[in-house]
């Protein structure tokens, strides 16, 4: 879908309309509300035998249809009963409650290198759904059958309810270490500059409702959300496809319009805001108080543009100011923009992130 948006499109209105259509399609596919399917088929004896012979097993939850709230809950029971350290593919961090002791983190641009190393070291990697090719070729891969035409992941989850847990789990230390790595990785390191994005997301982590819908542009912003925010069903993380600037804003507006009782938070940057800005006026007209946080490293005044569309808007120039801005935005009961004035190249998850951490740590330790 990213090919639909081009810089040559100077009129923002048709761009915003296409963004909203794309966002609504993604949200509809991610609704997760379907009738319970008949249980699928799974070789329970074979699965138990593979696990019983393992010393370092892991579970990898991949993409595919059928990730209903019920399927996620059942998969959590299966993981817990077998003490399986569990990772999820990029964008799927809401498939297992992030506070579940089995949750070890998310793959993708914000993946902890320790998690990918641990997955490589696993001697039994149970996979569910579509996972990246590198993991399907894992020497310890044990893919579970998941037929989209027969209920997909929801049917597989129902079948796992009949699989008895293994009798002995000698890998508890392995699973505990994976969990500790995740907790360490999700903590916010100090950032240089007056606006500490990691600290802001860490603050939001403890305050977003459990049923909030978080929508983010693809790339670093989605990676930051996956790393620092906390997800558990019925909450959702919806990440846009690569190249579709403004998806976070568009999806937040679409989500709050379709689900008025649930908080919707959109994460975007200056380019994304420019692409989706007209949708703020639509949100105002619909009475859909979506909240958008935009990281801005340009001289453009995004807050002024948002006010011109009828939205509440505030600019944050230092991290402590975000707290008041957040509550003011919520209490405005209107679509709202919080503009974070960040430094160029500050928003990333790996390359510049490492440089930011190196620059900040001497100050933090001193």
Image (cartoon, helix red, strand yellow):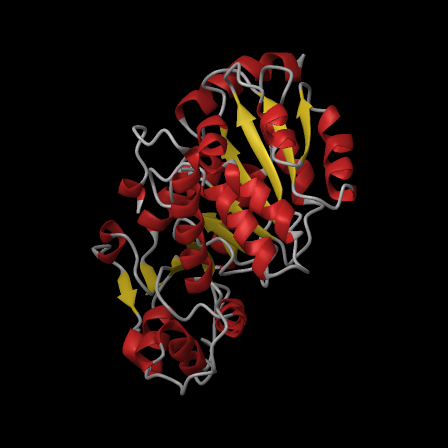
How many labels were placed on the picture?
0
Is 147 drawn above or below residue 237 in the view shown?
A: below
256 sits left or right of 112 in the view: right
Is 22 drawn above or below residue 64 in the view shown?
A: above
Indicate the position of residue 213 as horizontal and vertical percent values: 57, 53
45 sits left or right of 273 in the view: left
Indicate the position of residue 30 as horizontal and vertical percent values: 45, 62
Which image quarter holds the C terminus? top right
The residue lying at 47 percent from left, 77 percent from top is 34
Quadrant in which residue 124 is drawn: bottom left
Quadrant in which residue 243 is drawn: top left
**Residue 113, can we see it?**
yes
Indicate the position of residue 297 as horizontal and vertical percent values: 51, 18
The residue lying at 42 percent from left, 34 percent from top is 12
The residue lying at 29 percent from left, 42 percent from top is 4
**Residue 176, can we see it?**
no
228 sits left or right of 310 in the view: left
The residue lying at 60 percent from left, 14 percent from top is 193
Is 277 drawn above or below residue 251 in the view shown?
A: above
166 sits left or right of 205 in the view: left
Is 364 drawn above or below residue 44 in the view shown?
A: above
Indicate the position of residue 221 as horizontal and vertical percent values: 48, 35
Q: Considering depth in this image, is 62 or 174 the residue closer to the camera?
A: 62
């Amino acid at each position: 879908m990213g090919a639909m948006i081009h810089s040559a499109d100077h009129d923002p209105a048709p761009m915003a309309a296409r963004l909203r259509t794309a966002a609504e399609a993604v949200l509809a596919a991610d609704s997760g509300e379907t009738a319970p399917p008949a249980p699928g088929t799974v070789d329970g004896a074979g699965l138990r035998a593979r696990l019983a012979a393992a010393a370092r097993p892991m579970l990898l939850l991949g993409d595919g249809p059928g990730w209903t709230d019920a399927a996620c809950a059942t998969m959590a029971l299966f993981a817990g009963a077998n003490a399986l350290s569990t990772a999820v593919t990029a964008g799927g961090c809401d498939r297992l409650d992030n506070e579940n002791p089995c949750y070890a983190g998310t793959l993708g641009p914000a993946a902890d290198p320790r998690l990918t190393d641990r997955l490589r070291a696993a001697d039994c990697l149970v996979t569910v759904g579509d996972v990246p090719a590198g993991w399907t070729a894992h020497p310890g891969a044990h893919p579970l059958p998941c037929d989209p035409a027969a209920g997909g992941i929801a049917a597989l989850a129902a079948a796992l309810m009949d699989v008895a847990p293994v009798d002995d789990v000698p890998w508890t230390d392995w699973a505990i270490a994976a969990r500790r790595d995740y907790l360490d990785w999700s903590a916010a390191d100090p950032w240089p500059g007056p606006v500490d994005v990691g600290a802001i997301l860490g603050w939001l982590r403890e305050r977003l409702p459990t049923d909030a819908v978080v929508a983010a542009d693809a790339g670093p912003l989605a990676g930051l959300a996956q790393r620092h925010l906390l997800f558990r069903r019925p909450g959702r993380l919806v990440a846009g496809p690569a190249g579709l600037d403004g998806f976070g804003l568009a999806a937040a507006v679409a989500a709050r319009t379709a689900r008025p009782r649930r908080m919707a938070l959109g994460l975007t940057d200056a380019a994304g805001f420019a692409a989706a800005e007209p949708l703020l006026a639509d949100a105002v007209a619909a009475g859909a108080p979506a909240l958008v946080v935009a990281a801005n490293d340009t001289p453009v005044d995004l807050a002024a543009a948002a006010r011109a569309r009828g939205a509440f808007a505030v600019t944050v120039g230092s991290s402590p100011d975000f707290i008041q801005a957040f509550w003011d935005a919520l209490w405005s009961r209107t679509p709202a923009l919080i503009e974070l004035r960040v430094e160029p190249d500050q928003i990333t998850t790996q390359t510049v992130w490492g440089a930011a951490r190196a620059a900040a740590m001497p100050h933090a330790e001193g």
